[in-house]
Every structure is written in structure tokens, then in C-alpha cells.
Image (cartoon, rainbow, N blue to C red):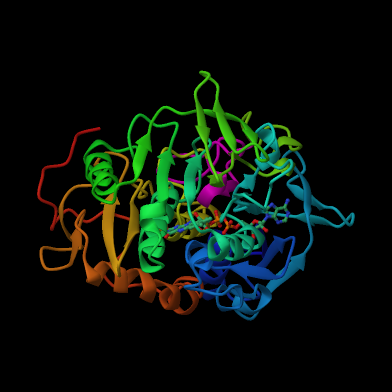
Amino acid sequence: MARKQIVILGGGTGGTMTANRLRRHFDTDEAEIHVVDRDDRHVYQPGLLFVPFGLAQLEEIVRPRRRQFRNGVVFHENEVESVGLDKDEVLLDDGTTLPYDVLVVATGVRLQPEETEGLTGPGWNERVFTFYSPEGAEALQGALERFDGGRFVVNLVDMPIKCPVAPLEFAFLADWYLRERGIRNKVELVYSTPLDGAFTKPIASDRLAGLLAHKEIELVTEFNAGDVDGVGGKLGAYDGRELDFDLLVTVPLHSGAPYVERSPGLGDALGFVPTDKHTLQTPAKPNVFALGDATDLPTSKAGSVTHFEAEVLTENVMRYLADEELDPGYDGHANCFIETGFNKALLIDFNYDTEPLPGHFPTTVGLPLLRESRLNHLGKLLFQWVYWHALLPGREIPGIGPAMPNAGKEQATVPA
Ligand SMILES: Cc1cc2nc3c(=O)[nH]c(=O)nc-3n(C[C@H](O)[C@H](O)[C@H](O)COP(=O)(O)OP(=O)(O)OC[C@H]3O[C@@H](n4cnc5c(N)ncnc54)[C@H](O)[C@@H]3O)c2cc1C
């Protein structure tokens, strides 16, 4: 076949895995693989959770992006300006155009704290923080060290967010941290969420609400945050309720990348890319695929999801180029460790049709599901090594793949 041009937008979790997997498959005379990202800092985002508590430092979780690519992947450090679906080309902000035979969208989400009134006003990064950005996580570390008591509110503004369990993990770790410092009795810890429970899925939501109660963390539900007074210490909801705080840690609104909105036919009103649930091809055009946080898929925005999607997506890019039928093999599989403090973690595993269930993963003798254990905590810590050395380079992980395993689960699956 003539040499194909594959252009991948975004060199984060999904873009890097996809580029390396495709590079392993195609020789350089078969395909040119281009990746575009605006910067050269690849952040291991699950590590951001640990930075505020001094359990990780930024320099341990950030690596040069270009060094994560296999030889022969062409990296463009540049901002994507727009995609011309009609001409099959991408425009970069320095005026370069990249023509493609196949386009892969992997540009993740954009944080939009400025969309919540007052959030980035006076008090931002002084008593109002987010740990969802490297700078925010680092600023929060200093604030937590100085914090000596009062009302501490952890808030999630609205769904969807990446890693929907991360704010819960933050609340659990805050409880641990304050107890370690001997000041837990001087702190009212509050978890406020727009959801009607601690989490989206019923069985996991009950377990997690139980853990919040056990750790004396107040759960405030259906709280749709609308405005923040960072000086007066008030978080307001659209229904008129108010939460007072001395320290606010929030997860801001998320949307898709702005260039998606500037590219007619590519995205929806929020800038997410409509994507086929099973093949990861987009309805925009048959030669455009998407994965990770950038899609509109009804599963969690998570690195594990992005990994499972990458396996199906790369197979489908190969099949598309070979004029073969696509593999509808992605089932919505997601797998998340939930750090609960005191060197323990829960594990949840689910897909489009099956909610997180108790049991073991991946088989009857694996890691405990929906139950706190040290083994899960070690799994969470070990994962960073797996990320840099196996996932990003595009290596297979035996026994862990796109299809959700059922063997260790205690209850039958819920039909679609
Ligand atoms: C605090 C926190 C904790 C998390 N914990 C977990 C966890 O425990 N487990 C888990 O599975 N997941 C976790 N996640 C989620 C996980 O990190 C993401 O779901 C995953 O990184 C998504 O991969 P992606 O490739 O879609 O996006 P990203 O990895 O975010 O990559 C997107 C890339 O696109 C680039 N980009 C965007 N727009 C443009 C543009 N216009 N031009 C050029 N480049 C652009 C960005 O610079 C970025 O590098 C966590 C996330 C956070 C924030």
C-alpha cells in the first residue's frame, strides 16, 4: 500500500499509546505517524492526587513528552488550530497544515474554572484551590501545610469530569492527613457533589457513602455550585443553598478542546467528540477516530478507559486502512483504584452494562473489588511504573484488556 499519513491530536495518555501501538505495527515505509501536542510535559495525572499531601512531587510525575514516543513518530510541539474535515487536513497555529488519511482525536478535556462565577477571583490559590492542574496541586500543598482548622469543603462543580472518583479520594486522603497531623478534631470536612449520592453507580455509591460517614465526612448531595466568594468563604448553589468554608478544594467544569468547537462537524455543544461506543470511529467521517477524555462516550473519563480504548482503536485504524470491517470490541470497560487513606484502597471494575460489583479482579483469586485493602493500595502505587514502562510504550498487559472480565464478580451482569 502507498505510505499512509496518520495524524494524532494530543500526546497525552491516549495519543501516546496510540502512536506507539501503530508504530509497532507499521514500518516507516508503510505509514508516517504524526503527533501534535502544545507542550513537552507529559503529566502522570493520577499522581496529582498525592502532590497536595506531600506524597509525590511534581518532578516525579512529569516527564518530557517527546521521549515517550517510539523512534519514527514525528512530534509537533504546537497548538491545534482546527480540523478541516472536508479537506482531510489539520491546521496548526503556526500555519502548518498536516494532511491525513486517518485522524485520531486524543486532546482530552479543558478545565474551565473561569466558568463558575467568582471561582478564579480573589482567594483563588489562597483559600480556593484545585488539584486537577500541576500548578494547583503544588499550590495546595503549601496551603494544606498551613491549614490549622476550620471548615474544609471538597466540591465537584459538575459532571463530566476526568476520574470521577478523584475528588472522593481527595476527601479520604484529607481525613487521613488531618488525623496524622493531630488536627482532625478541629476540622469539619464536607464533600459536596451535584450527584444524588457519593458516586454515579448505585452499589459503589452506597459503599462510598458508607466510607464517608465512617470517616465523619459530611456528604452534601445535589449541590450544583454556581458561585464562589473566595474572600467571605462561601460556596453558593443555584438552589440558594450556601456552604461556608475556610478552605475550598474544587474540581472545576470540564469541556472539550476549543479547536473542536472551531472545526465544523467534529464536536458537540460542549466540545466533546461524538464517537461510536464500540468501534471508536466518529460519525464526523469514517477516517476520523477518537478516544479518551475527548469523546462523548457514556463511560468514565479515565486513563484505564483510554488504555482499553487504545487497543480497540489501533486495531480499527489498521482495519480501516486495510479496507476491512471494524472491530466493535470496546464494551465500556473501566477499572479504577480508589485511594481511601491509611495505605488502603478500593478497586472498581465496570463497563457500559455492568455496574461495579463486589468480588475479585480479574478472576476469583485476584484483587478484592469494592473492599478496602492494602493490596489495592500497592496496586495503585505500582501503577505509575506500569504506566511509563508498559502502557505508554504500547506493550500488552497479560490478562488486562478491553473486554471486562466477569469471572471473579459476585453478581450476575445487568442486561443493557
Ligand atoms: C487528579 C487526577 C487523577 C486521576 N486519577 C486517575 C486514576 O487513578 N486512574 C485513571 O484511570 N485515570 C485517572 N485520571 C484520568 C486520566 O489521567 C485521564 O483520563 C487520561 O489522562 C485521559 O487521556 P487523554 O489522552 O484522553 O487525555 P490527556 O492525557 O489529558 O491528553 C490530552 C493532551 O491533549 C493536548 N491538547 C489539548 N488540546 C490541544 C490543542 N488544541 N493543541 C495541542 N494539544 C492539545 C494536551 O496538552 C494533552 O497533552 C486522573 C486525572 C486527574 C486530573
Which quadrant would residue 210 be assigned to in this image?
top left
- The location of residue 259, given as percent across then percent down, is 74, 43
* Quadrant of the image where one finds ligand 1: bottom right
Q: Residue furthest top?
A: 239
Residue 278 lies in magenta, yes or no?
Answer: yes
- Which residue is pictured at 53% across the width and 41% down the height? 245
Please state the extent of the stretch shown in magenta in the rendering.
Answer: 271-295
- Lateral position of residue 405 relative to residue 359, left or right: right
- The location of residue 33, given as percent across then percent down, is 66, 67
Q: Is residue 257 above or below residue 303?
A: above
Q: Is residue 60 above or below residue 167?
A: below
- Which residue is pictured at 67% across the width and 69% down the height? 41
- The location of residue 283, given as percent across then percent down, is 56, 35
Residue toward you, 281 or 248: 248
Residue 253 lies in magenta, yes or no?
Answer: no
Q: Is there any visible trace of residue 193 in the rendered image?
A: yes
- Quarter that holds the N terminus: bottom right
Secondary structure mostly seen in magenta is loop
Residue toward you, 187 or 175: 187
Q: Is there any visible trace of residue 69 in the rendered image?
A: no
- Quarter that holds the C terminus: top left
Number of marks drawn:
0
Residue toward you, 393 or 153: 153
- The location of residue 196, given as percent across then percent down, is 35, 29
Q: Residue furthest right?
A: 95
Residue toward you, 272 or 90: 272
- Which residue is pictured at 62% across the width and 69% down the height? 42
Q: Is residue 256 above or below residue 393?
A: above
